[in-house]
Image (cartoon, helix red, strand yellow):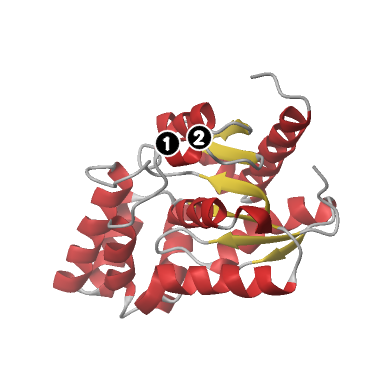
Amino acid sequence: MVLRSTTAVLLPGTGSDDDYVRRAFGPPLQQVGVELITPRPQPGRLIEGYLDALEEVAQRSGPIIVGGVSIGAAVAAAWALRHRQRVAGVLAALPAWTGAPDDAPAALAARYSAEQLRNDGLAAVVAQMRASSPAWLSDELTRSWTAQWPLLPDALEEAAAYLAPTRAELATLAVPMGVTAAVDDAVHPLQIAAEWVAVAPHASLCTVTLDQIGADPTALGAAGLSALIQAGRASTHPQR
């Protein structure tokens, strides 16, 4: 798998933003010569905005690396399955569910946050979040949630209803996929990341901890890149 001079389009997670994705993935990708494009989320048309961004870059570039965090990973993987000739690889960080969201922790959390925001307003919910979450996560979400207000509840609900690729669909993914999970993240369970890797033909998993991500966002990007490189090598010399 050739990375240098490739373009990567990475999509933010629900309620997160392009600033975080850029800080997490930019330095590791730059070291291997990959240009990173991080679309800004449009909370009034979250999924459609992501799809438009993928299409725009793909039209002017050769095969691209697609991916993202949480819902961004799901949207990118689904796009890769529909545009197989336009994709060089997939970087999936913290996938939240496979197929229908149902009662997945991330979907439940998004629905609950949307309801809270509609009932209590941004300031009250942010204050409650800052009292109960790690400082680094509170800082990240306070910035991104404020920027996406007042359409943030719409984005949260749209993400919580999204149908991610199924096991059967992931089993047809022909390009390498690097998957990252935080072993202590209850919202994005390790078992979902492991499921994606188990069913995709050319996939590899690297793990981190939430403390590692909090101390240095590039820990997430570096783990994802390492997994993608491993998956690329395995696809060149298949073992299964």
Q: Residue at x 71, y 37 (%)?
A: 226
Locate the N terminus and report the quarter of the image it occupies. top right
Q: Is residue 42 left or right of residue 200?
A: left
Q: Residue at x 59, y 71 (%)?
A: 55
Which percent across, then down, holds residue 193? 48, 35
Which percent across, then down, holds residue 177? 62, 40
Which residue is nearer to you in this view: 235 or 12? 235
Dot 1: element: helix
Locate the C terminus and report the quarter of the image it occupies. top right
Which percent across, then down, holds residue 45? 38, 76
Does any portion of residue 162 appear in the rendered image?
Answer: yes
Find residue 71 and report its image quarter.
Answer: bottom left
Residue holding disc 2: 171
Q: Which residue is situated farthest in the top direction here?
A: 239
Q: Which residue is situated farthest in the left direction here?
A: 119
Residue type at mark 1: give it.
Ala
The crowding category of the residue bearing disc 1, from other C-alpha atoms within 10 Å (few below 14, some 14 to 19, many at least 20), is few
Cα–Cα gap, marks 1 and 2: 5 Å
Find residue 144 and report its image quarter.
Answer: bottom left
Residue holding disc 1: 168
Label tally: 2
Which percent across, then down, holds residue 194? 48, 29
Does any portion of residue 40 appear in the rendered image?
Answer: no
Q: Which residue is drawn at 43% across and 78% down?
A: 147
